[in-house]
Image: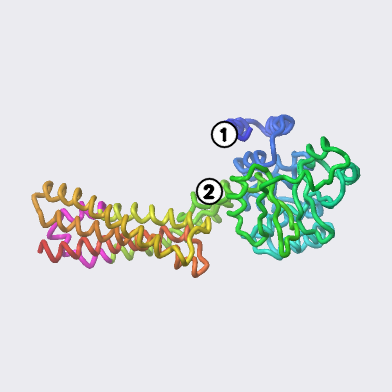
Amino acid sequence: MSDQKDLSLLIESLTQADDIDQSKQLTSYLNQGMDSDTVARLLEALKVEQRVRLWRALPLEFHIPVLTEMRSEARISVIQSLTPTELKLILTKLDNLSLLEWEDSLPDEIISEALRLISRDELELYDQANQYDDNQLGHWADQKVFTLPFNIRVSRARVLLDKYQDGPTPYIYLINKDKKFRGLISSADLLTAEPSAPLSSLNKPNLTQLKATAPLSEAVSALEHSEYPTLPVLGDYGILIGAVDWQFTLSVQREIYEARLMAGTGIHEGDDLFAPVFKGAQKRGVWLGINLMTAILASITIGVFENVIAQVVALAVLMPIVASMGGIAGSQTLTLMVRAMALNQISSGNRWTFLKNELGIGALNGLFWALIIGAITGLWYQSPGLGLTIAFAIVVNIATAGLFGVLIPILLDKFKLDPALAGSVILTTVTDVVGFFAFLGTAGAILL
């Protein structure tokens, strides 16, 4: 069911059915084992009225998991459609991880009501998670892991497992009396081990331990290279905070991918496919205004050399080539830089080495393509001067693109701005202005 092609077929089938058939189809999908994430993707693809109606038709145990898996605006569209009684019932059943997921997208009054209604145990776990920033593992770690004392024997562990186990427990975390982490064992090994064997003898080797203060990307990398589907998250003094598993990392990776896919457009990965027209237009209009300002800056640069373009018409034909070469070169460097920053691979110790490397690549590529484009231009227009002009402009613009492709993300990060979102707009402006100035300014000096 998770296959994208299958999902698109399910969406097509749902959108073409009437209300009764939609409910029957969704019930059938659930009976076939469809998970909450897939249900959420299906509901997001429907109009708000249909989405709310089908969400209400879900079995009660699916209500909160499906809302949690929805993107933030789609989730809000359902919550805002609930009656006060329905909302109170939902908030009462919230767990700490769902509340953490919802809190950035809901009004303060709803969050306050949720904090008042959720159970004391869930509230305590929620408060513990909020001791960490939302970009740290400790904030999102699943604190409801099954633990056992590390210094007991297998026979005693089996008794405790039977007594306190609540649902499937593939892995068990071992701790001491101070809740410090002592190891990880599997339930399968526990059931087949000698009853008299010490529990610690079943410990999994080569287990990566994650710090609660580590960034989310560290969990993605660690689980990618781990032979185990779950890893412990430790706080100060080695105290077990919780765990993260492969489902968590898949969710993080999807959010990172969507954020990068939409970066530079003013659209957030949480935006609703069927958001109200006025709201959608308002959000996108702001970004269009920003792009207009940058376009005006590039136009002003061209306007300064209006008399040059009027006398050498070929310059107007060639200008897009200069801008395009700089834009592509800059986006390559910017993409590498943003990825490296997201994975914490860039530090004060290596950023200038990376900058020099990108400048070298820019200079080499600039010279290579400048020779080719300059030669073609000179032959096409029978003007060696025009060929030299565009060649010089391309060298300057590609080198500039490499320079600012590194510097812009660093500066944006200093000001706590997302380089993936704002970097491409600023870089495009820089390469356009520098490219046009170098091209038209050189043309004015050489050709007139």
Q: Secondary structure at mark 2?
A: helix
- The amino acid pointed to by label 2 is Tyr
Residue drawn 80% across and 49% down?
146
For the record, the magenta segment spans 301-321
Question: Crowding near pointer 2: few (<14 within 10 Å), some, many (20+)?
Answer: few
Which color scheme is applied? Answer: rainbow
Which image quarter holds the C terminus?
A: bottom left
Which residue of the protein is positioned furthest toward the bottom in this rendering? 415
Q: Is residue 244 visible?
A: yes
| 416 left or right, relative to 29 | left
Which residue is nearer to you in this view: 344 or 272? 344
- Among the 4 quarters of the image, the one containing residue 163: top right
Name the quarter where the N terminus is drawn: top right
Above or below for 235 versus 33: below
Instruction: Indicate the position of residue 46 as horizontal and vertical percent values.
Output: 61, 41
Q: Circle 1 — which element?
A: helix
Q: Is residue 295 shown left or right of residue 133?
A: left
| Magenta stretch: helix, strand or loop mostly | helix
Spatial distance from mark 2 to mark 1, Cα to Cα?
19 Å
Q: Which residue is mark 1?
A: 8
- Front position in the image: 83 or 373: 373
The verdict on residue 447 being magenta is: no
Count residues near mark 1 (Cα–Cα under 10 Å), then give few for <14, some for 14-19, many for 20+. Answer: some
Mark yes or no: residue 282 visible: no
Q: In the rendering, at what x and y percent does residue 185 appear?
A: 76, 44
- Residue 161 is marked as none
Residue at the location (69% across, 41% down)? 36
Disc 2 target residue? 257
